[in-house]
Image (spheres, helix red, strand yellow):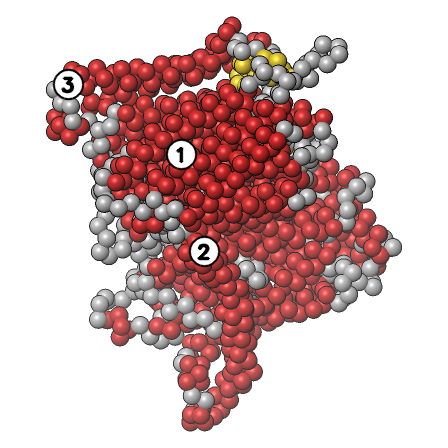
Amino acid sequence: MIDRDVIGYDQIYALGPVIILTLTVLVLILADCIWRAFSRHVKPGDVEHDDPAGMGLMPNLVITLIGATAAIADIFYLLGRLRAGGGTALAELFIARGFPDATGRHAWEAGALAIDSFGLYVALLGCLILIAVSLIMLPYLQSRRLFRAELFQLLVLSTIGMLLLGFSRDLLNTFIAIELLSLPLYVLCGLSDKSSASRESSLKYFLLGAFASGFLIYGASLVYGAVGHLNYKAIAFYLSSNPDVSNVLLAGLSLVGVGIAFKLALVPFHAWVPDVYQGAPTPVTAFMASGVKVAMFAAAIRLVNDSLVGLDAQYWRDALAVFAILSMIIGNLFALHQSSVKRLLAYSAITHTGYLAVALCAGGPAAAQSLLIYLAAYCIASIGAFMLVAYLSRPGQDDVYFDELHDLSQRYPAASAALAILVLSMGGLPMTAGFIGKLLVFRDAWAAGLHGLVIFAVLNSVVSFYFYLRFLRAMYMQPRVPGTAPLEAGSMPAAYAITAVVSVVLTILFGVLPQLLVEWGNSGVMLQ
Amino acid sequence: MIPLVSNSLILSAVLFTIGVVGVMIHRHPVMIFMCVELMLNAANLSLVAFNKQHYAENWHAVDGQVYAFMVIAIAAAEVAVGLAIIVSLFKRRARVDVDEVNQLRN
Amino acid sequence: MLQYVWLTIAFPLVGALVNGLFGQRMSKKASGTLGSAMVFLSFLTALASYFSYKSWAAGSDSPYFELTLWPWIHVGQLQIDAALLIDPLSTTMMLLITGVGFLIHLYSTGYMSHDKGYSRFFVYLNLFIAMMLILVLGNNLALMFVGWEGVGLCSYLLIGFWYQDMYNAKCGMKAFVVNRIGDFGVLLGAFILFWNFNTLSFTELFGNFSSVMNSATIESWVPLAAALLLFLGATGKSAQLPLHIWLPDAMAGPTPVSALIHAATMVTAGVYMVCRLNPVFTAAPTAGFIIACVGAATAFIAATIALTQNDIKKVLAYSTVSQLGFMFLACGVGAYWVAMFHVLTHAFFKACLFLGSGSVIHAMHEEQDTRVMGGLAKYMPLTYWTFLISTLAIAGIVPLSGFFSKDEILWRVATWQTQFGSAPMILWFVAIATAFMTAFYMGRVFFKTFLGKPRWTKHYVEHHHHPHESPRSMTFPLVVLATLAAIGGFMGLPHFTHAPNFLEPWLAASTGGEEQLNIVGRIGLEEHGSAAHDDHGTAAHDDHGAAAGHAEDAAAHHEAFVSFGSTETTEIIFALVSVALAAFALLGLAMPLYTKRFGATEKLHTSLGPLYRLSLNKWYIDELYHYLIVIPGTALAYGCWRVFDMKFIDGIVNGVGNVLGWLGHGVRPFQTGFVRNYAMYLLLGAVVYLALSLLK
């Protein structure tokens, strides 16, 4: 029942951002080769000797930034064309069609990749995250004396996966994009090979991630068995034309859900999150907390909005609601007593996944918009917070403990204030960006009739303030623990300072003038 | 249903289960990884079998089989990354047992 | 000029920002001056807005001047603007906050002069002023909630300001946790209002309120549920039973903070909210009854506790709780302007008392125990006189401010028109008993501190010469506040004086318009099948000038409900009774007990047996005092303290905390660090997922 265009060559320009980033990776590899060829040193150890400031990493950073900026420029160009055209999507690539009926009309017709405004906004977010993370990567590597040029290539590759996830409307594409997103991350987690925690996080993430993707692809094969196609529109068409849902399809969708829920870190698929977040190099943690979340929620909302529309909500919403509730409870409970800041932020990320899953339960274009807004606010806060952890942590340790934060406001008033504002935004304090995200997400879920879930989520967000306030208490209200050496972070490198200022300013700006963010989110889905 | 197809589907389900159970019981990362591969191959087998079931008359429709190739390619990439990670662990310790890798916990 | 009213918020915000960013590099003098100057500018702006509002209101039908600054959140039906609401209520609060706030900033420049965190203190204080102004000026519940949370945060930071002492940090935490319970109530109350009225804006809410209510599309539980949930928030913020426990602990913060936040402004936010949303509360008579009861109970219990405290700030803290109870009592009986009247006078005399106590603590080198004070009058005359005036004011001695506002509350309670039978009478007795105790404990603290023999000599001579009067930056605010505490009551003279009452017609524009009272009428009609409720209240606000006429009119209409009769003579008698009681408590009981016979109470506490050795004819009266008043009082106070503070409420708060903490610890073993366990969770999740979607 399939008829297809193999490829829309005339529309390939719509993949511009992806192509630009791919070229960036190639240039990065080439630059690395050239640099190594012309440098007298072959082993990284020698480089360390010769280049104590790590300036050899500078070209990589510059190339990455140029690539990401070019991609952003292209995204704005594409958005402009999209607005001028006025259609729902700029281009559909790799279009497939259902067989025509007697009148010659196709039952469904859809591309495996849809370059629409939603996808373009996800791509924009991805490129911005790439810029922020590469910026904080440089001083981090310099302070840790880790001169690894390949990690910029890996970061960009992972970002390409993010972009493709935002565009993808086909289960196989989604699977490939998830792998493209994850494989570089497995390596990035183990980046600091001097640290056993880093290696351990890499192994755990890899083994569990591969396990989860096994579920995902097996689920996809069952969906294929039931529907005969993996395109979301095909699934939606099948669901609308077959009122009795087959168990094979339900089982398949559930297993696909398991694979996605693993990457989203919904409880009980979350167990890797605290260990991996803690062990991974902090900028990589920042990338996981922001980029992976954005991409996976984009994929999840596409799946819900594009393919599950015809399915009775009880088949998928109940399970999702259970996992959302569990995520909120478990995330909050575990966060209460953490002594490590990175672990606490990891559990708080699980709680946030719970709130976001509430919006996912609601579904629909409004929820897609609210998700984008919430994620933007959350990314700003979490990149900023992890950046501050990277800045404050001792070189050998790669984590900060609450004991060490005591009395920090006396010695690093600016960093303390920034961290306080960012975690309060995560908690959803009014007049910060985080509050707007929560407000919109809860409003959508309420409008969708999920009243109990919303009340539960509000209660949880009230409770979660308790552990966000631990930051304020430690930094502003507790004297230094006798016997602990104070953190010696030195003066803030420029890249950190830029990220900190931008994230704090945006957090407050979007809190005071959320209309900027709301309209941004609006245009992200209006045309969908 | 063609017996070949249904038998293949049963086989694929069995393979998947063996893979899942294997991940649970093995302690060596390479063995765990092999079991994950088994899960991917179970998916491949069922993709091919379902393709046969859906498009028995249409020899040009080979989506499922192409999907299987893509999965194989992905699996190969996973092997490259995974073995590298495991080897980097091997470099530090004589014996690798996932139950000994639990420095990161509450 | 009204367009620039936002400047009043912007000034302290700028002050906080500049002090926060550059405070550590500025001299103490510069950062203190900056902080105070910003609040002073804010006060000038508020004053200018007041006058321009007056002239604006003269030519306008509506009392509400709405200033939309920018569209805040516009999503679908949710339309929230960053808008300010200028009306008599918010203008009054704005003047109070900036005026008293400025005086306390000034005082702090002296009080905190030796503190390390000087500029940090002014950052928090300025931020607090800005947040408090957002709270009272916001034209919608969302913006009010921003201020509500903001002042909570500032209060939390200021209570734990001297965090080197772990106890202080814990007190700050307690305040925050208790307040979160209340905040949850505010959020849910706001949600209920939004779902039913489709707006969070005050002006839109008031505009539609009567029509929506009369059209009966709203179920009857809605106003009650909204009112009670909002009141739960007020209970937390304004330290009412059963959430009052944080306020006495909040005294761990610096004294200017106690004066500004925990006496004059923040804790009255709950009262402000009830007055602001008075149509909602008026529409739910049961809620009014509950508020009145909670207010009266809080007033009474807090007063009994204040009787026996030795820490000067603890007495004032419980006194604040008690006075806030009076304000809620007034709110509960529907006398919103009277509640605001008491907010004002209380702000004057209680801020003065707290600052005076700060001056004493300063002079005594951080000593807060009144048992080792005494005889300070001659060393610090200004503090002594201002403290005296404020003590007389809070005790309700004519013609100081406290008399007028408290007497008005008592009168309103006595003449309350309600379906709850003899509630007015009971509440009135509770209130008058509380007023009596107030006079006594304030007399006690005053006499113990300033009169009698100095009990600090021995401890003191070792280190210093003698206590000294505070610097001028600290005494100037005391003098201003004492003056206000003395004359502030003339804003709202009672009806029987036939003098013009300035406050009532001014505030009535926002707290007692016709519309709201019509709703009361409707509900009264529905619930009782009689029009009995309708026009008493209306009359009260119609005939501002001819008060006597209103009283007679009301009495004629509602004999069945009026407990004490409502004639002018009764009102005068009531006033005389309360003044006489207060004077007796102060001069007859507290003065002899705590000046000449000082130590008798303590001796009694330690040993009851040796009493007979004391001179008979002189001690006979004292004994009577003790058996009749002090011992039952102590027992009652101790009992209240045991039951309400220690066991019951602390138990609940700690219990919840412990359960959460225990759960938090209990779940930790699940995070084993073993990959295979994690894989197992994943598999279990997959099984649950499959089961939930397949077993339908």
Q: Secondary structure at mark 2?
A: loop
What is the tally of numbered marks visible in this picture? 3
Q: Can you say whether C3 is above or below C382 in the image?
A: above
| Residue C468 appears in view | yes
x, y percentage for residue A522?
A: 57, 24
- Label 1 sits on what residue type? Met
Instruction: Give the image quarter of residue C629.
Output: bottom right
Q: Marks 1/3: CA distance?
A: 33 Å
Q: Residues within 10 Å of mark 3 (few under 14, many from 20)?
A: few
Q: Residue at coordinates 57% horizontally, 62% vertically from top-left?
A: C242
Query: Which quadrant of the figure contains the C terminus of chain A?
Result: top right
Whether callout 3 and callout 2 share a subunit is answered no
- Mark 3 belongs to which subunit? A
Whether callout 2 and callout 1 share a subunit is answered no
- Mark 2 belongs to which subunit? C
x, y percentage for residue C69?
A: 55, 29
x, y percentage for residue A396?
A: 22, 42
- Label 2 sits on what residue type? Val
Q: Can you say whether A494 is above or below C666 in the image?
A: above
Classify residue C558 as left or right of residue A319.
right
Q: What numbered label is drawn on residue A288? A: 1
Q: Residues within 10 Å of mark 2 (few under 14, many from 20)?
A: few
Instruction: Work out whether residue C410 or residue A522 is closer to the camera in this orientation and state it.
Output: A522
Instruction: Work out whether residue C230 or residue C219 is closer to the camera in this orientation and state it.
Output: C219
Q: Residues within 10 Å of mark 1 (few under 14, many from 20)?
A: many
Q: Dot 3 corresponds to which residue?
A: A39
- Label 3 sits on what residue type? Ser
Q: Dot 2 corresponds to which residue?
A: C667
Q: Marks 2/1: CA distance?
A: 25 Å
Instruction: Work out whether residue A225 or residue A43 is closer to the camera in this orientation and state it.
Output: A225
